[in-house]
Image (cartoon, rainbow, N blue to C red):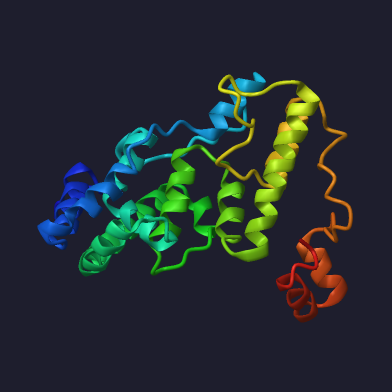
Amino acid sequence: MKQASHFGKAHSLEIKRAVYASVPKEYRAGLDSLFASLNYDNYSPVRRMEEALGISGIYHQYDFPDGMPPLEFEALMKPMRVYEILEKGLCNKEEQIAGEYMKAAKSKSLFAIRRMYNELTTLNPELKAAHIEPTQIRSYVAVISGACSGFPPEDIIEFSRATKGSANDRINDEKRRFSKFLEEKTGKRRSDGGPLVENWCPSLKTRNRILNILGLKNEREVPAPRGSLRRAVPDEELAMIYGNEFYNFMNQRGMFD
């Protein structure tokens, strides 16, 4: 029996046709606008930081189906990513109207993005630890895009588990503080003037690896803002101290953020 081919350009085009077929012609301007917003140059934030600091060893190389280049694999998601924009609510009135009609084709897009995710995690099983919301296309996109950008596995996993509320605020705050810390310690910034760490939230493990490479191993953590209750103790140790139920209760309320 002939083995089914991996998800490729023909499959991606098939999804795009299905999405366009779901929207009446008079409302396709909104759909065109959604697709146009995905026309951007995606250069790995990890590579940008490495180049600005003159280091290497942070970018993580993943395996992709048929040895496909990462950006080529990521481009296959474009017809599905229009739903990501809608799920995040980042759309105008015209796009919202098109989005109502697009619901009819979402199941095909969800099936396609799951297929891409399954193919990626089969080749890179370390990514299976990432948290996925099965009905949200943006959840799959976060993992796939992270891999295509060369984010370390632990960064992708942590981000996938902190997509809401205080957890999301925490990792974004840590990213901003760490970027500022690096800029102050090294005196370096990106050539375009942007922050050293942007569009990527490095985990504590990755931040410490960066500091080690830079010879700043004794400064492993950027001090948290005054009044913060953040603890430099692993979650499993806190659970042992307080008991799982109590720790989980307090952690959900940001006690250890």
In the figure, residue 20 lies in which quadrant? bottom left
| Residue at x-position 34% and y-position 44% | 37
Residue at position x 34%, y 43% from top? 38
Q: Residue furthest front?
A: 93
Residue 210 placed where, x, y %?
71, 32
- Report the front residue among 4 and 232: 232
Residue closest to the eye, 243 or 13: 13
Quarter assignment of residue 101: bottom left
Seen at 54% across and 36% down, the residue is 60
In this rendering, would 156 be left or right of 196? left
Name the image quarter holding the N terminus.
Answer: bottom left
Where in the figure is residue 36, as x and y percent of width and height? 29, 42
> Is residue 1 positioned above or below 57 on the image?
below
Q: Check the image and report above or below for 97 versus 226.
A: below
In the image: residue 25, left or right of residue 119: left
Q: Quadrant of the C terminus?
A: bottom right
